[in-house]
């Protein structure tokens, strides 16, 4: 098996070159795009416009402004308490996946609505479909265990003409399953993505948040309020990231020819060895690890395929290459 492990290095990886979100946010422009952001804007000690990134309402207003401005949305909103993820990191994931697909397309990004992505845990925010469709014209299937999240994401798609017909949603009634109950036996998608719940319990998620906020504010923080919010299932699950991703890897073997590539974000570097061992045991043809960094947070993408080189060439010819 071709094993392409890219170890995290002391030097942080840079933001993807196709990512729109380099440098500081243009707060002046963004608050004009979304007036709801204005109450949260202030000058920092250097005289630059900024927001309080510890305030969930400010982060939500910022995300809305970014999505309306940079991804040509007409509407975006999520119910209170649902995950409101940082946009730059989500964009990096999409662009890195585009690079993996491009390796089987003569080095050129694969574009168009014929390309289908399964977003596992699409969430109420629908961010990956928004970025993927805007950047590459891809179509999406969004799965989630939370019906309220799906309803919110469906509203986003319905209210944005550019997304109509490009994103479909499927409820996963059994949280212990990833692909079963979502993908039909003979159905094909071109790749899968996932931002898994990283923690094993709510208490663990809150403890992690307290450590992060205390480090950032350089003082002890006693109340764990997530600046990006998040529900159970979005942030924590029994067994945490390790069990969730191992389950995903195992189940992907049952759908080995249904997708050209499978992928997931991995938060904890210490889990990588376990994932590599399992991938090798189930007989993947190739897996790659791509490090990412946003601010002080390091993460990485693991992607794997069961397709041989000739099978991948046939897949690309049949589905990606314009006739």
Image (cartoon, rainbow, N blue to C red):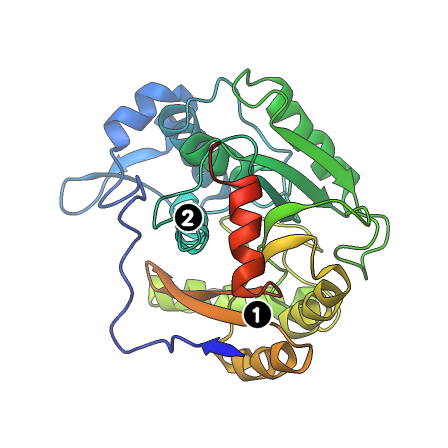
Foreground of the two, 111 or 70: 111
Circle 2 packing at 10 Å, graded few (<14), some (14-19), many (20+), is: some
In this figure, which residue is indicated by the disc labeled 2?
105
Q: Is residue 298 left or right of residue 311?
A: left
- Residue at x-position 55% and y-position 38%: 115
Foreground of the two, 161 or 61: 161
Q: Is residue 202 left or right of residue 267?
A: right
* Residue 211 visible in the picture: no
Counting from the top left corner in percent of width and height, residue 123 is at 64, 43
Mark 1 and mark 2: Cα distance apart in space: 44 Å
Q: Regarding mark 1 in the picture, which secondary structure is present there? A: helix
Number of marks in the image? 2
Relative to 177, residue 46 above or below: above
| Mark in front: 1 vs 2 | 2
Counting from the top left corner in percent of width and height, residue 97 is at 46, 52
- Residue at x-position 60% and y-position 25%: 156
Circle 1 packing at 10 Å, graded few (<14), some (14-19), many (20+), is: some
In this figure, which residue is indicated by the disc labeled 1?
207
* Residue 75 visible in the picture: yes
Q: Earlier in the sequence, mark 1 or mark 2?
A: 2
Relative to 15, residue 318 above or below: above
Q: Is residue 172 left or right of residue 13?
A: right
- Residue at x-position 51% and y-position 68%: 267
Foreground of the two, 207 or 3: 3
Q: Where, quadrant-wise, is the N terminus in this rendering?
A: bottom right
Relative to 76, residue 143 above or below: below
Counting from the top left corner in percent of width and height, residue 301 is at 48, 63
Q: Is residue 83 left or right of residue 176?
A: left
Q: Regarding mark 2 in the picture, which secondary structure is present there? A: loop
Counting from the top left corner in percent of width and height, residue 153 is at 65, 32
């Amino acid at each position: 098996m071709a094993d392409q492990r890219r170890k995290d290095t002391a030097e942080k990886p840079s933001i993807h070159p196709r990512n729109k979100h380099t440098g500081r946010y243009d707060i002046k422009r963004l608050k004009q795009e979304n007036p709801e952001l204005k109450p949260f804007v202030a000058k920092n000690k250097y005289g630059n416009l900024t927001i309080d990134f510890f305030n969930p309402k400010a982060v939500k207003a910022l995300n809305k402004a970014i999505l309306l401005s940079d991804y040509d949305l007409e509407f975006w909103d999520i119910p209170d308490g649902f995950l409101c993820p940082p946009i730059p990191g989500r964009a990096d994931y999409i662009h890195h996946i585009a690079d993996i697909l491009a390796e089987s397309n003569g080095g050129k990004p694969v574009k168009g609505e014929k390309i289908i992505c399964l977003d596992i845990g699409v969430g109420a925010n629908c961010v990956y479909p928004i970025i993927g469709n805007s950047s590459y014209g891809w179509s999406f299937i969004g799965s989630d265990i939370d019906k309220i999240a799906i309803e919110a994401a469906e509203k986003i798609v319905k209210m944005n003409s550019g997304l109509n017909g490009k994103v479909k949603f499927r409820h996963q009634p059994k949280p212990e399953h990833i692909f079963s109950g979502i993908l039909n036996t003979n159905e094909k998608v071109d790749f899968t993505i996932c931002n898994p719940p990283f923690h094993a319990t709510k208490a663990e998620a809150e403890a992690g948040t307290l450590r992060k906020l205390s480090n950032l504010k350089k003082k002890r923080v006693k109340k764990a309020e997530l600046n990006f919010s998040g529900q159970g299932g979005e942030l924590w699950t029994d067994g945490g990231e390790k069990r969730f991703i191992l389950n995903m890897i195992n189940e992907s073997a049952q759908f080995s020819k249904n997708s050209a590539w499978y992928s997931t974000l991995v938060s904890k570097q210490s889990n990588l060895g376990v994932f590599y061992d399992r991938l090798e045991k189930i007989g993947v043809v190739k897996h790659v690890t791509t490090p990412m960094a946003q601010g002080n947070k390091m993460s990485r993408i693991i992607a794997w395929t069961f397709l041989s080189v000739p099978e991948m060439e046939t897949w690309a010819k049949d589905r990606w290459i314009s006739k």
